[in-house]
Amino acid sequence: MAPRLLLIFALWAGCSPCSGREGPLAATIQPRVWCQAFRYPIAVDCFWTLPPAANSTRPTSFIATYRLGVSAHGESWPCLQQTPEATSCTIPDVQMFSMVPYMLNVTALHPWGVSSSFVPFVPEHIIKPDPPEGVRLSHLPGQQLWVQWEPPRTWPFPEIFSLKYRVRYKRHGAARFRQVGPIEATSFTLRAVRPQARYCIQVAAQDLTDYGESSDWSLPATASVTLGK
């Protein structure tokens, strides 16, 4: 048991996920697992991929469990899957600001054997909101653009767990984007834009307290705005 505990501690120190393997082919097809808290603090969602099994016509099923803490003797709970063949699961009721990490175990049941991956994480460290939605532009007097957007619908409590935003914009034909932020509101006035120019604008979101990482950029504003003189 001691070597297993040492291996788990090594994982938590930053090593790549370990894998338990049985069977001749399982050594090369252990699950690649990652987790993301885009619905923080309601849930953590975990995903995995598996290389195609050689010469196999039978589907692979998975068992996903998690526990709080690195102790191998800790109590485990199921990570909720829609079906045994699903390649994702959900950990509900996340314990916020825990002093110990979660440990996820995904076991793949192959026709010829078993392989497992263990992934440790702290929910606050894997926060990554989905991109903001509904980015839109309005023309204001004096060569200005009013940019508006909405928090991602998957972010459950934006009035409590606030987000901050970055805006990037590019004039049609320009070589690179310019960026402004962080902005705590869901609108921004872009000033001194060029007359008769078209602008592409996108917005990204991040937890206000800098936990985790920024979202991907939103879809561009759905309509470019041509400014008059």
Image (tube, rainbow, N blue to C red):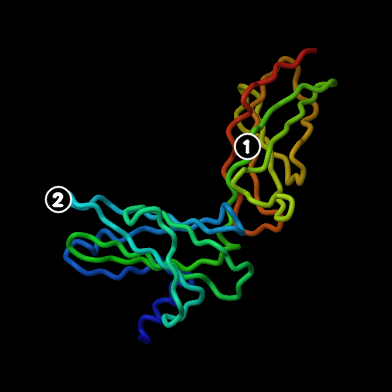
Q: Residue at x 60, y 49 (%)?
A: 129
Vertical position of residue 168 compared to residue 183: above or below = above
Quarter of the image with the C terminus is top right
Residue beneath disc 1:
133
Query: Where residue 151 sits in the image (x, y, percent)?
Result: 67, 43
Report the front residue among 142 and 109: 109
Mark 1, Cα crowd under 10 Å, few <14 / some 14-19 / many 20+, is many
Which secondary structure, mark 1?
strand
Which numbered circle lies on residue 55? 2
Which numbered circle lies on residue 149? none
Q: Is residue 103 left or right of residue 18?
A: right
Quarter of the image with the N terminus is bottom left
Mark 2, Cα crowd under 10 Å, few <14 / some 14-19 / many 20+, is few
Q: Residue at x 67, y 54 (%)?
A: 207
Query: Where residue 53 sits in the image (x, y, percent)?
Result: 21, 53
Amino acid identity at mark 1: Glu
